[in-house]
Amino acid sequence: MRRNSRLVVGVVALIVALLLITSTGSFSAMTAERPAQVTVVDDPDAYLGVEQETEQADNGSTLNLTVTNQFSGGTDLDEMNVSVGGESQEMSLDAGESETKTFESIDCGDPITIEASGSGVEVSLDRTVECE
């Protein structure tokens, strides 16, 4: 009888040891496909709307750059830096607000850089001065 109980204890110990060293069937990584929809729009219709108007002159062009905050209500852009051809101007825009900045003595093709942040969003834009 003692021999049978030792055998049973040995078999149970072996089963427990095997259960402890084998995987439990869980996973450590997962890939899931989620639908995403992205719409590409022109600059004036983007969340940070930008419109350029240039006036040609002999000593360079003048650029009127209108920037519009078109993020959803309550998304204010508290910090914004607008740079054209090396000249920078600071501004801020509440939701739905527009402002026009004027840059003088610029050349066609000069870089335009806009960096804005606020209310949990950050946006940056790199363009060039377009001349007619």
Image: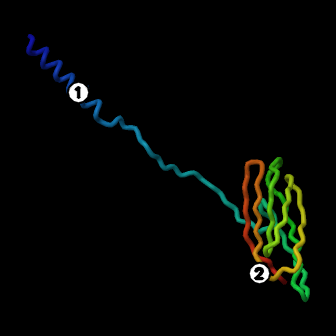
Answer above or below: position of 75 versus 3.
below
Residue 83, given in percent of the width and then of the height, sits at 79, 69
Q: Secondary structure at mark 2?
A: loop
How packed is label 2: few (under 14 Cα within 10 Å), some, or many (20 or more)?
few
User: Who's the residue at 90% across and 89% down the image?
Assistant: 58
Which quadrant of the figure has residue 49?
Answer: bottom right
Kindly report which numbered mark, 2 or 1, lies closer to the viewer in this rendering. 2
Q: Residue furthest top?
A: 1
Answer above or below: position of 58 versus 3.
below
Answer above or below: position of 85 versus 90.
below
N-term-proximal mark, 2 vs 1: 1
| Numbered label tally | 2
Amino acid bearing label 2: Gly
- Does residue 12 appear to the left or right of 106 in the view shown? left
Amino acid bearing label 1: Ile
Determine whether label 2 and label 1 are within 8 Å by CB.
no
Residue topped by disc 1: 15
Residue topped by disc 2: 109
Q: Nearer the viewer, residue 41 or 67?
A: 67
User: Who's the residue at 83% across and 58% down the image?
Assistant: 69
Residue 91, given in percent of the width and then of the height, sits at 86, 59
Q: Quadrant of the C terminus?
A: bottom right
Residue at mark 2 to residue at mark 1: CA–CA distance: 76 Å
